[in-house]
Amino acid sequence: MTDKSIEKQSTKEMQYSPEYFMGEALKEAHKALAIGEVPIGAVVVYHNNIVGRGFNRRETSKIATTHAEMTAIEMANKELGKWRLTDCDLYVTLEPCPMCSGAMILARVRHVYFGAFDPKAGAAGSLMNLLTDERFNHQPFVTGGVLKEECQALLKDFFKRLRSRNKADKAVREALKKSQL
């Protein structure tokens, strides 16, 4: 093998690495951030092709189930024309919640990759572990911590800005209230 063929091969392998697809999920998370949503993104991958994309839209849609994973799963179901996603992997920037973990189990997702851990609502090992619970008829493989730092940083920055904004809004409300007295 020549150096160029090795370079092409490693570029192709890198393109289809978990980090590559988590990078695609991060692009979806940035879409959520752009509309003021909690920046969580997800992609569903079938034979190295993205067949489903989603980002968090709960606040803008006013629908509790519009999590990134749910949207990506629904898009993949439509794209593939089937509800079983047995040959699919799902990449999400934050550890899935119980609802999304349940959807992954029901859809028979093969492998779930997530970025940041979620100690408050994570159902892939942090708070509980639904995805590998052998009482269910399907357990996907689970890999956590893919591009963890990038995923965590995006979420931390979002919530830091949100707290600052809320603090400023509260100060304005208090000032208005005092001026009306």
Image (spheres, rainbow, N blue to C red):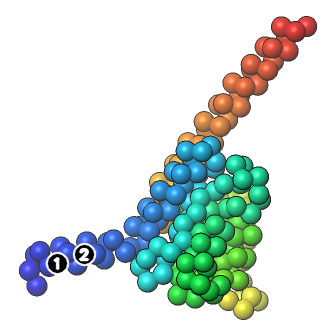
**How far across and down, in percent of the image, does residue 77 sit?**
61, 79
Q: Amino acid at mark 2?
A: Ser
Q: Taking 163 as reference, is 100 above or below it?
A: below
What residue lies at 66% left-to-right and 54% top-to-bottom?
57
| Name of the residue lying farthest toward the left | 2
Circle 1 packing at 10 Å, graded few (<14), some (14-19), many (20+), is few
Residue underneath mark 2: 10
Residue underneath mark 1: 6
The answer, for residue 172, to whether it is visible in the render is yes
4 or 71: nearer the eye?
71
134 or 10: nearer the eye?
10
Q: Taking 7 as reference, is 23 above or below it?
A: above
Horizontal side of 169 relative to 143 (left or right) equals: right
Quadrant where the C terminus sits is top right
What residue lies at 72% left-to-right and 25% top-to-bottom?
169
Q: CA distance from mark 2 to mark 1?
A: 6 Å
The answer, for residue 115, to whether it is visible in the render is no
What residue lies at 51% left-to-right and 51% top-to-bottom?
30
**How far across and down, in percent of the image, does residue 164 sit?**
65, 31
Quadrant where the N terminus sits is bottom left
| Name of the residue lying farthest toward the right | 181
* Residue 13, image quadrant: bottom left
**How far across and down, in percent of the image, does residue 24 sit?**
45, 63
Circle 2 packing at 10 Å, graded few (<14), some (14-19), many (20+), is few
* Residue 66, image quadrant: bottom right
| Label 2 secondary element | helix
**How far across and down, in percent of the image, does residue 94 sit?**
60, 61
Q: Are marks 2 and 1 in contact (CB under 8 Å)?
A: yes
Q: Amino acid at mark 1?
A: Ile
Horizontal side of 174 relative to 34 (left or right) equals: right
| Label 1 secondary element | helix
